[in-house]
Image (tube, grey):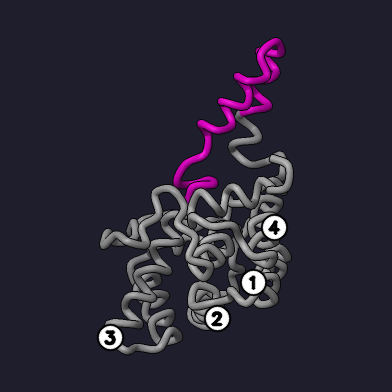
Amino acid sequence: MVSATFADVVFLLHKGRFPSEGERRIIDAILIAVADHGPGSPSAAAARMVATGNRAAPEAAIAAGVLAIGDAHGGAGLACLQLITDAMNEARTKATSIASIARRIVADAHAEHRRLPGMGHRTHSRDPRTGVLFDLAKTAGTAGDGIAFMIELERAVSEAIKPLPINGSHRRSANCFSSSVEWPGSARKSSRSTRANAPCGSRSP
């Protein structure tokens, strides 16, 4: 409490050690990016609606906002992390390039009319927060396979479908995968497949 930051504790709980200065900066940036949210999101709208009817209990409004978070809003991160994990497992076991795996994933999703989690944003044609987080990872020396795969996936989507930016769900997942941070419910050690109909994270922050 005297010297450690909240980001230190978050990292410690998942990794069993304190983060480096670069890793701490990335966790801080991820938390800031999560907080950077517009009023039009489902969670913000739910919280504001409840607050208008129950002004004596702000905790009720907060609870309503939390309950609005799910697979279509704010919860696509796990599907993104699973997508990255499966792609990296395939690259290791089949000695296939990340770029070719990304193109195959996009082609399959396009043929099956499935949305790719973590791609697209309702406001940004290129989310400025993605570049900041990826640059921080490069500076910290943690920009690994997760980020490399997402860059290739974004390129494959642009070539095969249309330009869609990496959004909040995938930029966080890519950083966490590259930094080997095991978030609660992380599928990195699981063989479960990515949810086939996981919605595009276009409604994510």
Residue tagged 4: 29
Instruction: Kindly identify the amino acid type of the residue bearing the numbered disc 1.
Output: Ala
Label 1 packing within 10 angstroms: few (<14), some (14-19), many (20+) = many
Above-or-below relation of 82 to 71: below
In magenta, the rendered stretch is 47-76
Query: Quick one: label 4 or label 2, which is nearer the N terminus?
Result: 4
Disc number at residue 155?
2
The residue positioned farthest toward the front in the image shown: 2
Query: Quick one: label 1 or label 4, which is nearer the N terminus?
Result: 4
Q: CA distance from mark 3 to mark 1?
A: 27 Å
For discs 4 and 2, the disc positioned in front in the rendered view? 4
Query: Residue at 40% of width from left, 87% of height from top?
Result: 100
Above-or-below relation of 32 to 80: above
Residue tagged 1: 137
Cβ–Cβ under 8 Å for marks 3 and 4: no
Disc number at residue 94?
3
Q: CA distance from mark 2 to mark 3?
A: 22 Å
Instruction: Kindly identify the amino acid type of the residue bearing the numbered disc 4.
Output: Ala
- Image location (x, y in percent) of residue 115: 44, 62
